[in-house]
Amino acid sequence: MAVYTHVGSEDVSGLLEQYGIGPLESVKGIAEGVENSNYLLHAGGQNYILTLYEKRVDVDDLPFFIALIDHLYDAGLPVPRILPDLSGSHVQSLCSRPACLIQFLNGVSVERPTSRQFWSVGQALARMHNALSDFDGARPNTLSLSGWNDLAASMAGQFDAIAPGLESEVTAELAYLSAHWPKDLPQSVIHADLFPDNVLMSGEDVTGLIDFYFACRDITAYDYAVTHGAWCFSADGSHYQPQFAASLSKGYINERPLSEAERAALPTLARGAALRFLLTRAYDWLNTPADALVARKDPLAYLRRLQFYRSADAAAILGE
């Protein structure tokens, strides 16, 4: 979440009329995240999220996201529905951007989760994967191996402006992953971005899985690797927390056991996940507009994760 496009209260009030919602009582920009412009609305006595789609989200993908979220909602997962207006349309136009009004879910993103909360996140991730086993929607992962190569090429010659030696680190890792990326593992639609700020919790329970705009069809265990990297390290990536990794894995495996092939591939999948976020953070670091209301994220935090995964085995990743 972030704010790139600024909207006025008059614009929002006009949009809400299409939903039969009002009056608008407050509107506030949300600075977290990097992908879209997001606002918290309070109108007609209820809260809503207004999202304007920017940057990497293609409006042609929105029907896929809507169907995906509806599928998960119908399966009992705590996901926020994209709301239809009075005519049944889910996608609007606001300030020359595609826009959606989204259900608000209660709960907070936790900064220092407990072991039990880690267990609950692992369980929720596995339940999501199980629910998506019969979802036939398809969207390619544009941020997998070929996408990483393209993204790195677009920043060629600039990496060392972030940190000396970063260019050679990226080049070497791309070569390794190109030679070793696993094939023939189980696939499903995955979230691909389940960071702590995309999970809402109340007490020890997960009350919301949000921001599915990177969702795609890819290796299911890769989604576990993404989540592991997002949750099981200190924010700067310098400290691995195996006790929390153990809780995450136990919650996940209790619902969806990993096959031997998935276990064996975890170190490589985790290296790929670390490189993916290193690259996108590097791109945003180099290209985020100076006046954008958005918190840039440190690419080097994922270089440190990558360096850990280079020497980790599956047991270390699972906290065994």
Image: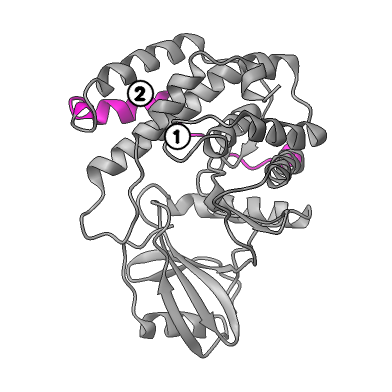
84 is higher (above) or lower (below) than 151 = below
Whether residue 171 sits left or right of residue 307 in the image: it is left
Q: Which amino acid does label 1 sit on?
A: Thr
Q: Distance between the residues labelled 1 and 2?
A: 11 Å
Secondary structure under the numbered disc 2 in the rendered image: helix
Of labels 1 and 2, earlier in sequence is: 1
Q: Kindly identify which residue carries mark 2.
A: 149
Whether residue 15 sits left or right of residue 265 in the image: it is left
In x, y percent, where is residue 243? Answer: 66, 32
Q: Which amino acid does label 2 sit on?
A: Asn
Binning the other alpha carbons within 10 Å of mark 2 as few (below 14), some (14 to 19) or many (20 upward) gives some
Residue at image coords 45%, 66%: 99
Q: Nearer the viewer, residue 268 or 215?
A: 268
* Residue stretch in magenta: 133-160
Q: Nearer the viewer, residue 11 or 262?
A: 262
Q: Kindly identify which residue carries mark 1.
A: 142
Visible residue check, residue 288: yes
Q: Which of 11 and 45 is in front in this view?
A: 45
How many labels, in total? 2
Which numbered disc covers residue 17?
none
Question: Which image quarter holds the C terminus?
Answer: top right
Inspect the magenta stretch and tell me whether residue 60 lies in it: no
Q: How is the image coloured?
A: one colour
In x, y percent, where is residue 291? Answer: 22, 60
Residue at image coords 24%, 29%: 163
In x, y percent, where is residue 9? Answer: 38, 83
In x, y percent, where is residue 319? Answer: 67, 25
